[in-house]
Image (cartoon, rainbow, N blue to C red):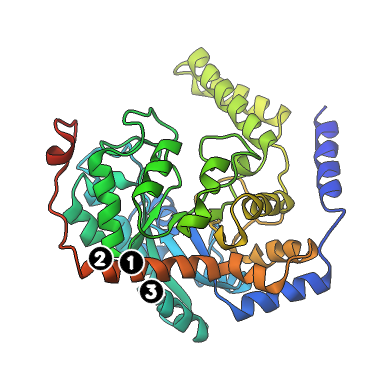
Amino acid sequence: MRCFLALLALTTISTAMSAQPSERDMARAKRVLASTPLVDGHNDLPWEIRRSTGNPRDVAAYDLRKRTPGHTDLKRLKQGMVGAQFWSVYIPGEVGDSGYARVQMEQIDIARRIVAMYPDQLQWALTADEIRSAFKKKKIGSLLGLEGGHAIENSLGALRVYYDLGARYMTLTHNVTTDWADAAADSARHGGLTPFGKEVVREMNRLGMLVDLSHVSPGTMSDALDVSEAPVIFSHSNARALVDVVRNIPDSILKRLPANGGVAMVTFVTSFISSDAATHDVVENRTLASLRTKHGQDTTAFRAESEAWTAAHPRPVVTLSKVADHIEHIRKVASIENVGIGGDFDGISVTIHGLEDVSKYPALFAELARRGWSDADMKKVAGENILRALSKAEAVSARLRGTRQPSTKTITELDGATSAR
């Protein structure tokens, strides 16, 4: 049986690879990426360093000049022709030992030290113009994406400090609903954004911080689009019409992006890309949970049975052609102006065949070239769209700073009684 399943997997790969980009397609892709910055919206390297070293202070132990155990290092970033990177400063919404802010500051510290350690290849670039300037110097423009609004602990003052430290977007939630915004993977307690949540969006507009709607519920997406005067982004989400998981974007929201100027940055999470992979993950999680209940504290028995199940049920192979399908769907439903890339490398444990690490971006653009995409349209997906959105957010900020003072509103004032920490 295992031989048959292995053969089936190889056959699936072979079929998916039957229409491969040509050398000419790859040459076009590399020419495009050499002429415009490839701006990736989401890389979890700071958390991977924290997780793998076990010491958030020991950034040097994860040497990016060498081949790292994860998806990201300097050599592979160069091979992937990455022009700029939003380094995700993610913290889990379940952290509760001494408040979110301490862990968030540690993650920002890790990210800032990563950039400082490799000045010959990484450069702080906190505006669209600075990203283009770094690209001309053949350096990777670096800025931060704060993943999870729980990190502000219901404080607009904390939000402003995070902006000052380099955060140029904030994902309004992670997997946990906050006191002011509903998450996609949690209960919808508010029907979207509360009045304080809307004030958070307004203050982000004033600062020039992009509103990131990955991880949030459709209600939160819709409310944010109603409130935001600047383009929103989805730093790592795909099309829900193709794969019906809560982390993907409904067509009803995609249709609103052209008017807003926002960018949906397609990610490489296999269960967001492939319905087969999504189904497999649901069944696997349910099975493992059942086995944990069955075996209790008998970890040896649990490990043996779970490994046997995993061997008998291999993950479906997901190829980069399906990533291109999501890009094309978003182009069709929204427009070519509303698509970008947010790989989520070092935040995923299973990778797409052909997109195994940060060195593989040219292969995705070669696939778009094979499908007949123009150089101009590939440039928009690579980075021009997100740079335009960032520039617009900066312009909105310049206007609002001339008419608004920093908001002093509190969640108690706007929402009344709250279960805030």
Which secondary structure, mark 2?
helix
Mark found first going from the N terminus, 3 or 1? 3
Q: Tell me which amino acid carries mark 3.
A: Thr
Q: Position of residue 354 (x, y in %)?
A: 71, 56
- Circles 3, 1 touching at the beta carbon (< 8 Å): no
Which secondary structure, mark 3?
loop
Q: Residues within 10 Å of mark 3 (few under 14, many from 20)?
A: some
Q: Which mark is residue 396?
A: 1
Quarter of the rendering occupied by the N terminus = top right
Q: Position of residue 65 (x, y in %)?
A: 50, 72
- What residue sits right under mark 3 in the picture? 127
Q: Is residue 383 left or right of residue 165?
A: right
| Picture quadrant of residue 384 | bottom right
Q: Is residue 134 above or below residue 56?
A: below
Give the distance between the C-alpha atoms of the residues marked 2 and 1, in whole angstroms.
6 Å
Q: Position of residue 309 (x, y in %)?
A: 66, 25
Q: Residues within 10 Å of mark 2 (few under 14, many from 20)?
A: some
Looking at the picture, tell me which residue is in the foreground, 314 or 238.
238
- Circles 2, 1 touching at the beta carbon (< 8 Å): yes
Residue at screen point 83% across, 59% down? 20
Residue 66 seen in this snapshot = no
- What residue sits right under mark 2 in the picture? 400
Quarter of the rendering occupied by the C terminus = top left
